[in-house]
Amino acid sequence: SYAAMEKTFKIYVYKDGLKPMVHQGPVTGIYASEGLFIDTMEQGNQFITEDPAKARMFFLPYSVKQMVNYLYDPYSRSMKPIKRHISSYVRNIGVAHPYWNRTGGRDHFFVSCHDW
């Protein structure tokens, strides 16, 4: 039932990573939904747990828009720096925490509320 789901569905938000590309997203303008979602997850609500063993889902709080701002070179148009950053972040999560490896990341998610 929905009531049971509200009691048992928990999300763990990873603390790993450094601002500005992780834990911080835009909160104004056309990309605000990404930053506002990250902020909402980090501030906590009834679905957030501090205990990853109780989590059913795991949130990777990196900002695609911030990666574009800091890593993307519009002159080269190469996505390689962004791909390297995401790969490194996920690899570090897998090394530091058992939860990624338990399911191969199938219970992990991030948001990208735009066309990047």
Image (cartoon, rainbow, N blue to C red):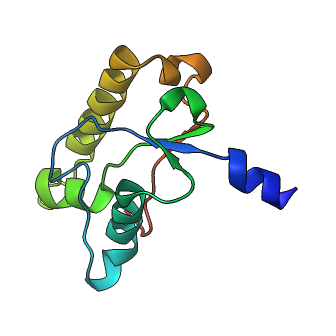
Residue 92 lies, with reference to residue 38, above or below; the image says above
In which quadrant of the rendered image does the N terminus lie?
A: bottom right
The one of 99 and 74 positioned closer to us in this rendering: 99
In which quadrant of the rendered image does the C terminus lie?
A: bottom left
The one of 46 and 36 positioned closer to us in this rendering: 46
Residue at horizontal 33%, vertical 63%?
39
In the picture, measured across the screen, residue 103 lies left or right of residue 28, that is: right
In the picture, measured across the screen, residue 73 lies left or right of residue 55, that is: left
The one of 95 and 88 positioned closer to us in this rendering: 95
Q: Position of residue 56 (x, y in %)?
A: 63, 37
In the picture, measured across the screen, residue 2 lies left or right of residue 7, that is: right
Asked where in the image residue 111 lies, by quadrant, the reply is bottom left
Asked where in the image residue 85 lies, by quadrant, the reply is top left
Residue at horizontal 42%, vertical 68%?
115
The one of 41 and 102 positioned closer to us in this rendering: 41
Q: Position of residue 79 (x, y in %)?
A: 27, 47
Q: Position of residue 104 (x, y in %)?
A: 56, 23
Residue at horizontal 57%, vertical 53%?
47
In the picture, measured across the screen, residue 46 lies left or right of residue 70, that is: right
Residue 88 lies, with reference to residue 15, above or below; the image says above
Label tally: 0
Q: Position of residue 29 (x, y in %)?
A: 27, 84
The residue at the far right in this view is 1
The residue at the far bottom in this view is 29
Residue 91 lies, with reference to residue 107, above or below; the image says above
Asked where in the image residue 97 lies, by quadrant, the reply is top left
